[in-house]
Image (cartoon, grey):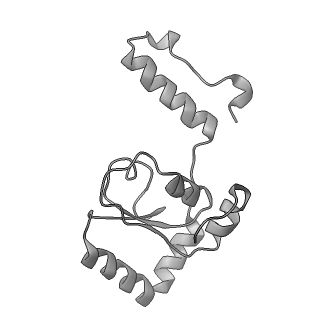
């Protein structure tokens, strides 16, 4: 896709049939993946920590062994030959379930646990941000 303005992300990604992210190393919740899921674009990702936690195989996309070009090629050939299956996935894609606020609250809880805070003292998102 190249570079584009932030306010165009959803529009551009929602026009893509399949977002492929063939990482060869572990990731840290890449924004392209989260934006793809938020735009209800099916994804094909490498089985890498930091990405697999967000993808539900068969529901939001496909997870392939890291660095396995033949597996990715096979997936693409399968999807081209079975477009009905692919378009059914795309139509039923639930999208990304988390908001920035709920994701931030989850991260804050992890830090709270790491700091040894009792659960009643762990940070939460402000009520006005929970939607």
Q: Residue 10 in the image: x percent, y percent?
A: 67, 61
Could you say which quadrant of the image residue 3 lies in?
bottom right
Location of the C terminus by quadrant is top right
For image coordinates 39% across by 81% down, the residue present is: 76
Could you say which quadrant of the image residue 63 lies in?
bottom left
Instruction: Give above or below for 34 relative to 42.
Output: above
Location of the N terminus by quadrant is bottom right
Instruction: Give above or below for 2 relative to 104.
Output: below
Instruction: Give above or below for 19 relative to 78.
Output: above
Report if residue 59 is visible in the image.
no
Q: Residue 58 in the image: x percent, y percent?
A: 42, 65
Q: Residue 86 in the image: x percent, y percent?
A: 48, 77
For image coordinates 56% across by 60% down, the residue present is: 36
For image coordinates 49% across by 30% down, the residue present is: 107
Total labels drawn: 0
Q: Nearer the viewer, residue 115 or 78?
A: 115
Instruction: Give above or below for 88 relative to 120.
Output: below
Q: Residue 83 in the image: x percent, y percent?
A: 49, 85
Q: Is residue 12 left or right of residue 90?
A: right
Could you say which quadrant of the image residue 92 lies in?
bottom right
For image coordinates 70% across by 66% down, the residue present is: 11
Report if residue 25 is visible in the image.
yes
Direction bottom: furthest residue: 81
């Amino acid at each position: 896709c190249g570079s584009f303005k932030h306010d165009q992300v959803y529009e551009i990604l929602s026009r893509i049939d399949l977002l492929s992210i063939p990482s060869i190393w572990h990731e840290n919740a890449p924004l392209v993946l989260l934006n793809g899921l938020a735009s209800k674009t099916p994804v094909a990702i490498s089985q890498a920590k930091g990405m697999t936690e967000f993808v539900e195989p068969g529901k939001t996309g496909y997870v392939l062994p890291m660095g396995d070009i033949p597996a990715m090629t096979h997936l693409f050939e399968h999807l081209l030959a079975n477009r009905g299956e692919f378009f059914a996935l795309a139509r039923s894609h639930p999208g990304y379930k988390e908001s920035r606020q709920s994701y931030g609250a989850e991260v804050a809880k992890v830090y709270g646990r790491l700091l040894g805070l009792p659960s009643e003292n762990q940070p939460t998102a402000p009520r006005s941000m929970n939607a």
